[in-house]
Amino acid sequence: MEINELKRKALQIREMTIREIGHFGSGHIGGSMSIVEMLTYLYYQEMRIDPKDPKKEGRDRFVCSKGHAGPAVYATLASKGYFPVEWLKTLNAGGTNLPSHCDMTKTPGVDFTGGSLGQGFSAAIGIALGQKVKKEDSRTFVVIGDGESQEGQIWEGAETAAQWKLGNLIAFTDLNKLQLDGPTADIVSMENIDTRWLGFGWHVQRINGHDLAAIARAVEAAKEVTDRPSMIIMDTQKAHGFIPGENTTKNHSMAFDETVAEEAIKELLEREGE
């Protein structure tokens, strides 16, 4: 896809995510909306996947370690045809296949079940190691949050992946600078996050996480590095695209109904000139 096509697809996924959460009445809008461009690029341009065969051997894998972004992952998977779009109306409902955090036992296309923050990152490292042992020509992609990066498990994984020279592992940090309790700067600052990853022996890039062209360039550069894992740090805005949540620190999870959702989508489309 050309960049303009990817932008239109990202806008569609934003609309789907807003409607999905609005139908339920509340949900993790903040961390979902901040990674839409990354998800769009991976699923529509980069990853070798087959929605008709979600468990196909040799496929690329994606792990959403920052589990609160589940609604955006579901919208992306639905848009790719892994399951009917109508499923999005069942988010968090009793008996749903779309629980709050991604669950590989329930949702087609989900490669790992998100548990406590940090665990998905460890699992992604294990998946990438398995691909390397099997000599597969495939990659593992994983996204972590900046609040999640306060977990010690992240840094244990960082040194392990570097030790094993997992050049087939490409990670993203969603640096939206907010977490449940407020700004990360007030809790554990992520100001020097670039040098931390460099210190652990990773190939590091820092980009605008809402710029699809920048994401494309960063992923291509990461693929050229084969002797160590790559970290792409994305400067993002929490709740980006859900305008009622953009200028508040209380956007980790928000309550809003379908009326508000449609109003927010209309405002977004007007801002984007659609």
Image: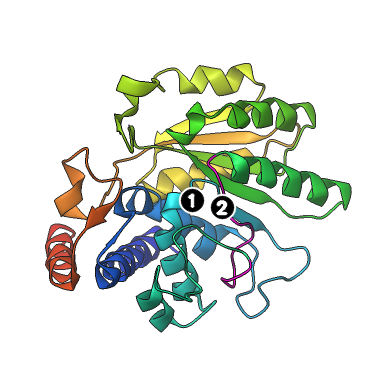
**How far apart, in angstroms, are the residues tagged by discs 2 and 1?**
5 Å
Question: x, y percentage for residue 194?
Answer: 49, 22
Which residue sits at x=52%, y=60%? 102
Question: x, y percentage for residue 32?
Answer: 37, 53
Dot 1 alpha-carbon crowd within 10 angstroms: few under 14, some 14 to 19, many 20 or more? many
Residue 253, relative to residue 8: is it above or below? above
- Residue 193 is left or right of residue 19, and the answer is right
Pick the quarter of the image with the C terminus.
bottom left
Label 2 sits on a secondary structure element that is loop
Task: Judge by depth and name the residue closer to the eye, 164 or 126.
Answer: 126
- Residue 229 is left or right of residue 253, and the answer is right
Q: Residue at label 1?
A: 67
Question: x, y percentage for residue 168?
Answer: 72, 44
- Residue 50 is left or right of residue 186, and the answer is right
- Residue 75 is left or right of residue 203, and the answer is left
Query: Quick check: is 116 in the magenta stretch?
Result: yes
Q: Earlier in the sequence, mark 2 or mark 1?
A: 1
User: Which label number is shown at residue 186?
Assistant: none
Residue 253, relative to residue 234: is it above or below? below
Which residue sits at x=51%, y=74%? 97
- Asked whether the viewer can see residue 274, the reply is no
- Asked whether the viewer can see residue 60, the reply is yes
Quarter holding residue 106: bottom right
Which residue sits at x=87%, y=47%? 133
The residue range painted magenta reads 105-117
Quarter holding residue 92: bottom left
Amino acid type shown at disc 1: Gly
Quarter holding residue 157: top right
Question: x, y percentage for residue 241?
Answer: 24, 54
Query: Quick check: is 239 in the magenta stretch?
Result: no
Amino acid type shown at disc 2: Gly
Q: Residue at label 2?
A: 114
